[in-house]
Image: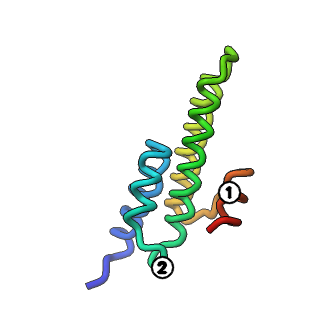
């Protein structure tokens, strides 16, 4: 029995937003447990979340006063991208998205 459209939408909302919520950690979990043939779209966002998490970590630890705030802004942007992806809008992050597309 196939899932209804609302169930599939709810699953996508949880997975897409959840992938960006814990960035690299949840990105790795989603990447490892989602079948690539079944959902390449979600794999793309998982890889994007992993790279975003690494970028946030690096930016946070650079000893410049406003960089921790910048890392928070990047995290919020990731949540926005996850929400838009769950709604079916194809959002690709600058630089990170291009890198992921080349290496997928």
Q: CA distance from mark 1 to mark 2?
A: 19 Å
Q: Is residue 3 above or below residue 63?
A: below
- The residue under label 2 is 37
Q: Secondary structure at mark 2?
A: loop
Marking on residue 97:
1
Q: Is residue 74 above or below residue 102?
A: above
**Quadrant of the image containing the C terminus:** bottom right
Numbered disc total: 2
Residue at image position (49%, 46%) is 24
In depth, the one of 8 and 29 nearer the eye is 29
**Quadrant of the image containing the N terminus:** bottom left
Position of residue 20 in the picture relative to residue 48 (left or right): left
In depth, the one of 47 and 1 nearer the eye is 47
Marking on residue 32:
none
Residue at image position (56%, 37%) is 76
The local crowd at label 2, few if under 14, some if 14 to 19, many if 20 or more residues have their Cα within 10 Å, is: few
Q: Secondary structure at mark 1?
A: helix
């Amino acid at each position: 029995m196939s899932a209804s459209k609302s169930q599939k939408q709810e699953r996508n909302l949880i997975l897409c937003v959840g992938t960006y919520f814990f960035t690299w950690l949840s990105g790795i979990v989603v990447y490892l447990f989602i079948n690539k043939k079944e959902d390449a779209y979600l794999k793309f966002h998982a890889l994007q979340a992993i790279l975003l998490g690494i970028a946030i970590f690096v930016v946070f630890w650079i000893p410049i006063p406003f960089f921790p705030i910048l890392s928070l802004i990047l995290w919020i942007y990731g949540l926005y991208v996850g929400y838009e992806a769950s709604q079916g809008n194809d959002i690709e992050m600058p630089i990170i998205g291009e890198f992921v597309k080349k290496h997928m």
